[in-house]
Image (cartoon, rainbow, N blue to C red):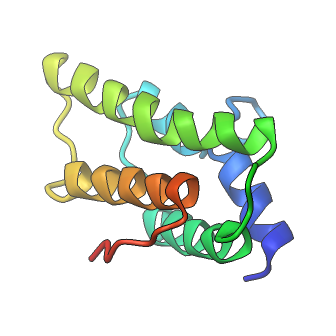
Amino acid sequence: MNYEIAYKLIIDQTISSEENPDALLMRLRQGKPPVPGQITSILLALKVLFASHQDATAIDRQLANALYQLTIKSQQLFTAGLRAGVDWPPLLKEDLQRIAIASEGIFSGHWQNIH
């Protein structure tokens, strides 16, 4: 996966539209689990973005917003789903925490083992 594909994948996971019904945030908002392989693809994209931004002093606003949403909004939607009685997959909470750790790594410039 190259930078452009990773960037687009991360941005697309936060956009809710008819063209992108399988965006992670859209699925969580609807009380649906991620599609198979979706979390793995997101984590791979985050690692590619980390490698590209490791020595950067700034990242663009659109990427920062997407990282924020994937970190904060996904966990909020997960919690709201729990309260509403959604039966989430057993490892989804941990997967969302891995996304948060990877996003933090992009901001801090220090990658942590997320597995």
Quarter residue 57 falls in: bottom right
Side (left or right) of 65 relative to 59: left
* Residue at (60% x, 46% y) in the render: 22
* Residue at (44% x, 72% y) in the render: 111
Side (left or right) of 27 relative to 53: left
Residue 108 appears in view: yes
- Relative vertical location of residue 107 with respect to residue 64 in this rendering, above or below: below
Residue 35 appears in view: no
Q: Quadrant of the N terminus?
A: bottom right
Q: Position of residue 95 (x, y in %)?
A: 30, 58
Q: Nearer the viewer, residue 49 or 24?
A: 49
Q: Which residue in the rendered view is the most extreme toward the bottom?
A: 1
Q: Nearer the viewer, residue 54 or 37?
A: 54
- Relative vertical location of residue 86 with respect to residue 106 in this rendering, above or below: above
* Residue at (22% x, 48% y) in the render: 93
Q: Position of residue 107 (x, y in %)?
A: 56, 52
Q: Nearer the viewer, residue 76 or 87?
A: 76
